[in-house]
Image (cartoon, helix red, strand yellow):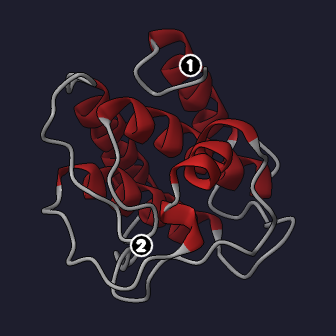
Amino acid sequence: MQTIFDVTERARLLRRLDALRPETPARWGRMTAPAMICHLVDALDSAFAPSPPMGPASPLMWPPLKQLVIYVLPWPRGKLQSPPDLLQTTPTDWLSDTARFRTALERVASRDPRDANWPSSEVFGRLSGRDWGALLRTHIHHHFTQFGV
């Protein structure tokens, strides 16, 4: 299982970050590379946010489907949407934003995945630390692939 809790996988992700440039065009979607980095920082920070109020149940909250999406299936291009009130950081400058990404990644990775106090996700519902580690790694991988790194 690939997870941000694995030091080797984090190093692999950081090498991919180093290959990215602010002008790198997306292979799909409308996001720019700087906006994508901020989106990922917000996603990483969400692992420390209070659990959101749970709205109507979505199919992605159903454990078998949730586990398939987090651990097994490749994510479709442009199909998974974040709730509009989440993930809204505006890019500032490339060096600051990529430094924030590195800091946020290490902050989540330093947390104990066995801790019982991980927040729920508005999209996936209740998540364990293990789930968060795999979900965040898959999310980062998805967007780095979007930009060809």
Residue at (39, 58) in percent of width and height: 43
Give the residue at mark 1: 9
SS label for mark 1 = helix
Q: In terms of sequence position, does the residue under pointer 2 or pointer 1 come before the other? A: 1
Where residue 11 appears, as percent x and y from the top left, is: 53, 18
In the rendered view, tell whether residue 77 sits above or below residue 12. below
Query: In the picture, residue 108 is in which quadrant?
Result: top left
Residue at (45, 27) in percent of width and height: 4
Query: In the picture, residue 51 is in which quadrant?
Result: bottom left
Q: Residue furthest top?
A: 8
SS label for mark 2 = loop
**Which quadrant does the C terminus fall into?**
top right
- In depth, the one of 81 and 131 nearer the eye is 131
Task: State how far apart marks 2 and 1 are (Cα).
Answer: 25 Å
Where residue 54 appears, as percent x and y from the top left, is: 27, 77
Where residue 23 appears, as percent x and y from the top left, is: 70, 64
Query: In the picture, residue 123 is in which quadrant?
Result: bottom left
Where residue 18 appears, as percent x and y from the top left, is: 60, 35
**Which quadrant does the N terminus fall into?**
top right
Q: How many numbered discs?
A: 2
Residue type at numbered disc 2: Pro
Residue type at numbered disc 1: Glu
Q: Can residue 49 be seen in this view?
A: yes
Give the residue at mark 2: 91
